[in-house]
Amino acid sequence: MVSIKDIAKQAGVSISTVSYALNGSSKVTSETTAKVLAIAKELNYMPNAAARTLKTRETKIVGVFLTDFSGAFYGDLLHGMKEILSTKGYDMIVCSGKHSHRMLPERMIDGAIILDQTFGSEELIRYADRGHKLVVLDRELTHPNVNQVLLDNKAGAMLATEYLIEQGHRTLYAVTGPRGSYDSKQRLQAVVQAVDRTTDVTLTVIEGDFNKKAGERAAAKIMADTDGGSLSSAVFCFNDEMAIGMFNYLAEHHPDVRIGEQIHIVGFDNIELAAYTQPRLTTIDYSERKWGALAAEQLIKLIHGEHVDHERVYVTLRIGNSVGMAAADAVQKRLNA
């Protein structure tokens, strides 16, 4: 491998002069810089990234840690991050799994955005204590090197649940995410709180995992509970993926059951596929792209030593016909008033 020593020898200058020239320093003349760069190109010189990182303590790379990559949710989130990072001169590495955690202590990245249950909160605090800059999207942590950019999960879940109760539903189902999910826990707390404030409402919690198959399993249980859909029920799926899984199951196994009449479904995330369900899915809406962009902006500020405050991504109720045409029209009129 060609080193700066080889360039210095062929150029007839010192190693420090080569280093200055390669880094665009004004300490060497433009003629010398041009000569050094020409020789470096001729020798196919490639900078040693590891050595540069040790010297500058920067990699210009940010790590994005996710629990998994499945589903339609992550595309817009990552796109929002990439847009901001690219404009700031950073690349990003997206990874998952416990073995990827070593990228932090080994200083392979300048900072990290965390949406990954495989990280324990104590582990993240240890990294923060060592000076690592972190933005968390899936938990609440208090540390000067950690910033929170969280969804307003409770507000979204409250909107969904109260909306269903306002339509007169007294049999509610909540299809949750996986047990370790911060978002799922927050949403369930809000659902329980809304139900507890109302008399004569029965809540059944079905454990899911944010994937379509969980929605299919939940639909099968609900159909069994309601005698094949002969009893009207309302379902709040904690994400759109599971709601779409529910749509798919009903279309295949119970084509006679009409969504929006016999079963009423609300999702969360307003992913692109939600716009193509028939009837249109009622869901909690926010911008995944903006969430990702905000997380990236906050991390860059942390890396540069700037002050940052915790941020919250606010949500709204996006009305569709999956809760009934008449009910949707009535609520939409109230929202527009």
Image: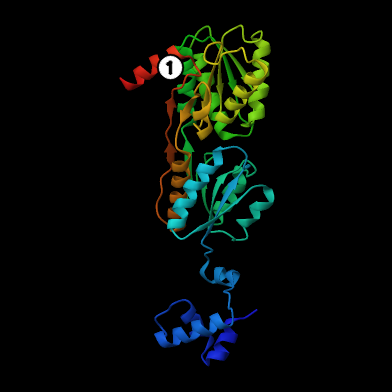
Q: Nearer the viewer, residue 60 or 36?
A: 36
Q: Quadrant of residue 50?
A: bottom right
- What percent of the width, then of the height, locates residue 115? 57, 43
Q: Position of residue 43 (x, y in %)?
A: 59, 82
Tell whether 231 sits left or right of 167.
Answer: right
Q: Is disc 1 placed on a helix, strand or loop? A: helix
Residue in the picture at 41% in, 49% down: 308
Question: Residue at the spot x=42%, y=87% of the render?
Answer: 31
Identify the residue at the far bottom of this view: 12
Q: Quadrant of the C terminus?
A: top left
Judge from the rendering whether residue 87 lies leftward or rightward of residue 51; answer left or right. left
> Counting other residues with Cα less than 10 Å from the Cα at mark 1, is it few (<14), some (14-19), or many (20 or more)?
some
Q: Which of the two residues, 130 or 150, is positioned nearer the viewer here?
A: 150
Quadrant of res 184: top right
Residue 219, relative to residue 301: is it above or below?
Answer: above
Which residue lies at the image location 55% right of the left edge and 16% below the top edge?
259
**Residue 146 in sight in this render:** no
Residue 90: image location, x then y, percent: 49, 59
- Name the quarter where the N terminus is drawn: bottom right
User: Residue at image x 62%, y 24%?
Assistant: 248
**Where residue 225 sits: x, y (%)?**
66, 11
Callout 1, which amino acid? Ala
Q: How is the image coloured?
A: rainbow
In this rendering, the count of numbered labels is 1
Can residue 322 be seen in the rendering of this structure?
yes
Which residue is denoted by mark 1 in the rendering? Answer: 328
Q: Image height check: is 44 above or below 159?
A: below
Q: 105 or 143, which lies in front?
A: 105
Q: Does residue 41 lie above or below 253 as drawn? A: below
Q: Is residue 25 above or below residue 280?
A: below
